[in-house]
Amino acid sequence: TIGFGDSLLTPSPLQVFGQAKEQINNIFVDVQNYVHDAYERMIDVNNLCPGVINENELDSILDYRTQVRGICEVLTRDQMKVAFFGRTSNGKSTVINAMLGEKVLPSGRGHTTNCFLQVEGSPTGDAYLITEGSNEKQNIESVTHLAHALSNGKQLNEKELVHVYWPKDKCRLLSDDVALVDSPGIDVTQHLDDWIDAHCIDADVFVLVVNTDSLLSNTEKNFFHKVSTNLSKPTIFILNNRWDASANEPEFIDKFNSQEQEREQHMERATDFLVKELKVCTPEEVVSRVFFISAKEVLQARVEEHNGFPLNNGVLADGFDARYLEFEEFERRFEECISKSAIKTKFLNHSQQGKHIVKEMHKIMETIYKRIQEQTNLKTCQKYELQKKLNVIEQQLISITNQMKMKIQQMVDDVKDKVSKALND
Ligand code: GDP
């Protein structure tokens, strides 16, 4: 068991992502410095001894410098991304609001989400939205304001992505770098493939929100078949929403038994879909991927709690506590999965790229070093040869000098002889 003190020391799964992000960022700052230093040294060497480093090598280092700079930029922006799908009115926006703990996204009648909405932490602390292809920040003060901004602006295309930046201090998920993406109803589009390319490729977790009034539709199934052929083993959660409504249906006389049976039926279908059809999880994992919840109740309770009222103020439907606990269990499993998946997909890729760059640079630096060594050796040999030649010349000079000396001596002796002979005569 984890005590209060331990929980302060043990980071939550979402914090593990934050820590990994900080570590990999620091490593890439080191790599960036290394590439920069290497380039500067190469320029110095090139100036001192032109020809030792060839142009390809200089170009490669410049290329690596650009690549590392790009990775550093992406890394600072990396976040965990969860995308919500399901038919219109199944409760996608309500689930997102419940997770955020307040009404951020408009939901309900007249507020059908007709484009993709990505809620993420605001870098400035203010709430604002930015539509696709624009840099203009539209301030939003409330959910009504947001609904207004979304319906009043230019006609939004269903494929379009609107970024909703929300104050991080209002929600732990946002402060821990989670981005939540709401989508238009899966039943209203002909462009599922485009959706996958545009919004799913970098999602770490998918949440399918279904309505327990009906069974999984073919459109919902088809969409996830396409997702799982595009992404290897995506992490998919199924939320059977409106479980409160099911609990209160008057036609069930023996409510508990009926709901148990209904749950079993939904569970069986979800298991068949995730384990047998999509093959994205094992039969053991399914219990931590499929949940029966009421997003509306959780949202209501959290808003009340935020306003200082107790979680269950007595006006909620039967079985609220169990549904609330199940929603919390979903959030716990979700946090574990999203953190693991994001670390693996986002950072593994970057660290492999980083490793490749450092390895290639090491090879280039070694080649240059060897080349410099070879050239130094060659110069030493040339010096030795020259020295040998100089020695021979020196010897020759000595012998010539000696011969000259002898000749001069002979000449002097000759002259001496001749002079003394002349004097005697
Ligand atoms: P979306 O179109 O999938 O985003 O659905 P919304 O989140 O807009 O929800 C559609 C309607 O269903 C709204 O009126 C919600 O209040 C209602 N709703 C959402 N979740 C629940 C739930 O768990 N129980 C009940 N009874 N109603 C819900």
Image (spheres, rainbow, N blue to C red):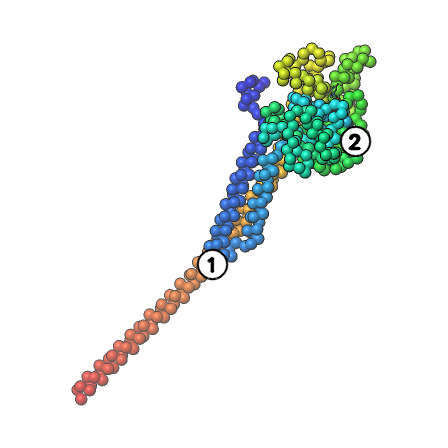
At 62% from the left edge and 14% from the top edge, which residue is drawn? 308
The image quarter containing residue 338 is top right
* Mark 1 and mark 2 residues within 8 Å of each other at the beta carbon: no
- The mark closer to the camera, 1 or 2, is 2
The image quarter containing residue 240 is top right
| Residue lying furthest right | 251
| Residue lying furthest bottom | 425
Q: Which of 274 and 159 is in front in this view?
A: 159
Asked if residue 323 can be seen in this view, the reply is yes
Earlier in the chain: of badge 1 and badge 2, it is 2
- Disc 2 Cβ-to-ligand 1 distance below 8 Å: no
The amino acid pointed to by label 2 is: Val
At 35% from the left edge and 68% from the top edge, which residue is drawn? 395
Q: In this view, does 5 lie above or below 28?
A: above
Q: In which quarter of the image is the C terminus?
A: bottom left
At 56% from the left edge and 43% from the top edge, which residue is drawn? 358
Q: In which quarter of the image is the N terminus?
A: top right
- Residue matched to label 2: 188
Number of marks in the rendered image: 2
- SS under mark 1: helix
User: Residue 378, which numbered label?
Assistant: 1
The amino acid pointed to by label 1 is: Leu
Q: Nearer the viewer, residue 127 or 306?
A: 127
At 74% from the left edge and 23% from the top edge, which residue is drawn? 108
Q: Does residue 139 appear left or right of residue 380 in this picture?
A: right
Residue 59: x and y in percent read: 57, 51
Q: How crowded is mark 2: few (under 14 residues within 10 Å), some or many (20 or more)?
A: few
